[in-house]
Image (cartoon, helix red, strand yellow):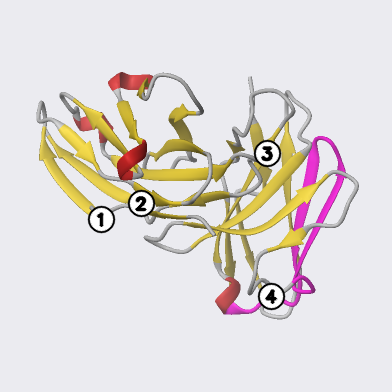
Amino acid sequence: GAVVSQHPSRVICKSGTSVKIECRSLDFQATTMFWYRQFPKQSLMLMATSNEGSKATYEQGVEKDKFLINHASLTLSTLTVTSAHPEDSSFYICSARGGGVAYEQYFGPGTRLTVT
Amino acid sequence: AQSVSQHNHHVILSEAASLELGCNYSYGGTVNLFWYVQYPGQHLQLLLKYFSGDPLVKGIKGFEAEFIKSKFSFNLRKPSVQWSDTAEYFCAVTNNAGNMLTFGGGTRLMVKP
């Protein structure tokens, strides 16, 4: 149980275009979902926290207008990178937390975004 | 704000050697502690976690960790590593509300066969 999926696993896009990444909790309801960014050989950095039905809370330094997060249902959150630039190229990972085991987050496999 | 530091960035061991990866955190309140592993090309997986109770926590694949509150530490240990343990290991902490998971910088472990 507690499986989180992400789609797509890899995406290449041109500079200036927008890209949407989906994060789904497959077998549980995720009251809270988190979006992380991982640069090569570095740790995960939390970008934002989203609760179902409410606006996401962004970490300091993360542009909310550039990284649009929608958590419309208890099983789906989306991250849209708008007007992507090469510096947005990174590994984006989502995690989900349900109402069951306290504080435990389940991670998706990640999405590698390359902006050319 | 909470922070996590992992002192060893790269560790190289031979098979059957013992492993200890250091993790120290900074936070004044009650914390929940985790160790995650990321095998090459795979996603993060939970190795073990500590919420309360026995400070010696046993996880999957023979790993264990000990929470020492006085030292703000949660070191990961394994008595005898295998080649398949080659991966990156992340220590993480969240506050009692569980709202923010803060990761350490990670330790890349290479086990030589």
User: Which mark identifies residue A84?
Assistant: 4
Q: Quadrant of the N terminus of chain B?
A: bottom right
Q: Chain of mark 2?
A: B
Callout 4: SS: loop
On screen, residue B80 versus residue B95, left or right, reads left
Which residue does the image show at 73% across and 80% down from the upper left?
A16
Q: Disc 1 and disc 4: Cα gap in Å? A: 31 Å
Write down the residue under mark 3: A96
User: Which mark identifies residue B9?
Assistant: 1
Write down the residue under mark 2: B106
Q: Disc 2 and disc 1: Cα gap in Å? A: 6 Å
Q: Chain of mark 4?
A: A
Q: Which residues are magenta?
A: A64-86
On screen, residue A57 versus residue B82, left or right, reads right
Q: Residues within 10 Å of mark 4 (few under 14, many from 20)?
A: many
Quarter of the image for residue A46 reads: bottom right
Which residue does the image show at 20% across and 31% down from the upper left?
B83
Q: Residues within 10 Å of mark 3 (few under 14, many from 20)?
A: many
